Image (cartoon, rainbow, N blue to C red):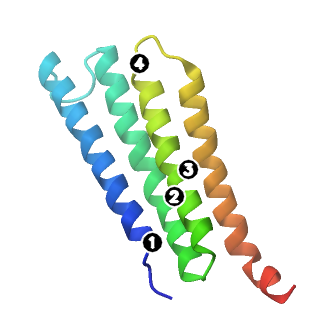
Amino acid sequence: MSLNITPIYVAILALLFIFLSINTIKTRRTHKISIGDGGEKALLRASRVHANFAEYVPFTIILIGILETQSYSSWIIHGLSIALIIARISHAYGLSQLNENFRFRIFGTSTTLNIMATCAFLILFKPLLASA
C-alpha cells in the first residue's frame, strides 16, 4: 500500500506551484506592490491564481493518494492526476487573462471539483465496491 504514482504528480504540481509563485512575485515587483494588490488588476489575478491553486490542489492530491493506498487501478490514479494538472493549467490560464475567456476558468474549476467528488465517492464506497 505504498505511494508509487501520486508522488510523480505531486512533484509536477509543485513545479507548477513554483511557476505561479514566481509569476506573482514578478507581478508584484513590476507594480511595486509588496502587500495586497494595490488595486492592480494584473496582481489581483496573479494572486488569485496562486491562492486558488494552494486552496484546491493539496486537498485533491491527498484524495488521489488515498485512492492509491486503497489499491485502486493505476489507470484511475494516472487519469485523475493528469486531469488535475490539465484542470489547474486551464484555470490558471483563464483566470490570469485580463480579458478573461471564462471557458478555461470554468473548465478548470468544474474539472477540479469533479475530481474531488469522484475521489470522495470512491473512498466512501470502497467497502461497498469490494463486497459487490
Quadrant of the frame with the C terminus = bottom right
Cβ atoms under marks 2 and 4 closer than 8 Å: no
From what the image shows, is residue 101 above or below residue 113?
Answer: above
Residue wearing tag 1:
5
User: Label for residue 83?
Assistant: 3
Q: Tell me how far mark 2 sits from mark 4, CA to CA.
A: 25 Å
Picture coordinates of residue 95, whole percent (x, y): 45, 26
1 or 2: tag closer to the N-terminus: 1
3 or 4: tag closer to the N-terminus: 3
From what the image shows, is residue 104 above or below residue 11?
Answer: above
Instruction: Indicate the quadrant where residue 64 lies.
Output: bottom right
Q: Tell me how far mark 1 sits from mark 2, CA to CA.
A: 9 Å
Q: Tell me how far mark 1 sits from mark 4, CA to CA.
A: 32 Å
Q: What SS does tag 1 mark?
A: loop
Residue lying farthest to the front in this orientation: 75
Instruction: Indicate the quadrant where residue 70 lies.
Output: bottom right
Cβ atoms under marks 3 and 1 closer than 8 Å: no
Q: Tell me how far mark 3 sits from mark 1, CA to CA.
A: 14 Å
Residue wearing tag 2:
81
Residue wearing tag 4:
97
Mark 2 vs mark 4: in front? 2
Cβ atoms under marks 1 and 2 closer than 8 Å: yes
Mark 3 vs mark 4: in front? 3
Instruction: Indicate the quadrant where residue 110 lies.
Output: top right
The three-letter code of the residue at mark 3 reads Ala
Q: In this view, does 14 lie to the left or right of 64?
A: left
2 or 4: tag closer to the N-terminus: 2
3 or 1: tag closer to the N-terminus: 1
The three-letter code of the residue at mark 4 reads Gln
Cβ atoms under marks 3 and 2 closer than 8 Å: yes
Q: What SS does tag 2 mark?
A: helix
Q: How crowded is mark 3: few (under 14 residues within 10 Å), some or many (20 or more)?
A: some
